[in-house]
Image (cartoon, helix red, strand yellow):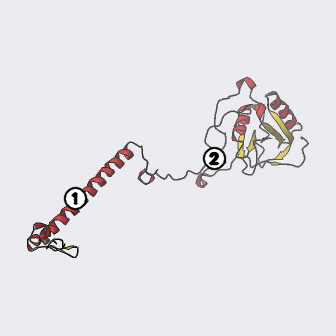
Amino acid sequence: MARNRDPKDWHGHHIISEDELASPEFTTEDRIKRRRKIRHGIILTFVVLMLAAALVLAYLVNTRTLIIDALEPKPGVEAPVAANEACPTKQFSYVDPRKMTVNVLNATQIHGLAGATATKLKKHGFKVGDVGNANLSNVQVVGAVTSGPDGYAQAMTVQRHIKDLTYVYDAKRPGKTVDLVIGTKFKDLVKEKSVNKKPGKLGCTPPKPKAAAKPSTVPDKPEPSTNNKDN
């Protein structure tokens, strides 16, 4: 018995009638409107999501919960300040004499002056290293204390025990041991109970402008002799 076939069905395919073709579903204008509405909805959703993400990001950055390096303020670049190693201006702490070593050198023709001074330094608590002779271009000074870059505080400490002692910097000198070179104007050490033990600066004479240059009484860098016997 033959089945009743749907006149709108042909070999499994639906045949669109004239009425269906004229319906709003199949008109070109309606299809365009429907697509435009979908597209606008997608764009609006995307904008809302981006705005929400921006607000969340701004909140995290503002509360420092999230730190972005590119947004951090750049520190101002300061011009480097040249340090005067030969005469530093910073303050140094007084060093316990028992924790430092001083070499005592005699630049005068006074026999036994280095040995006698070394004995007095020991009474002030200093450790004495070498005792011998040295050369100064100008011996008409109290003396000079020499150190390298690691011995600033130690040199300042020696100056507290010998008044008017000039500082001489030696860039190539290693360690914290200092040299005390005695000149002809040396008299004696400061009384131990009168020694100033507060932090302070080195006593040195900075270079003067060439226009106002005058003969200096500051001794050149002392040159120890190979003879360690005290004059």
Q: Is any atom of residue 8 visible in this view? A: yes
Residue 59, position as x, y percentages in the image = 35, 45
Residue 227, position as x, y percentages in the image = 90, 47
Horizontal side of residue 140 vs 60, given as left or right: right
Horizontal side of residue 66 vs 203, given as left or right: left
Q: Is residue 29 above or below residue 190?
A: below
Residue 170, position as x, y percentages in the image = 73, 49
Query: Amino acid under label 1?
Result: Gly
In the image as oriented, which residue stretches furthest toward the front?
A: 1
Residue 192, position as x, y percentages in the image = 75, 25
Quarter of the picture holding the N terminus: bottom left
- The residue beneath circle 2 is 206
Cα–Cα span, label 1 and label 2: 79 Å
Horizontal side of residue 190 vs 78, given as left or right: right
Q: Is residue 97 above or below residue 20?
A: above
Quarter of the picture holding the C terminus: top right
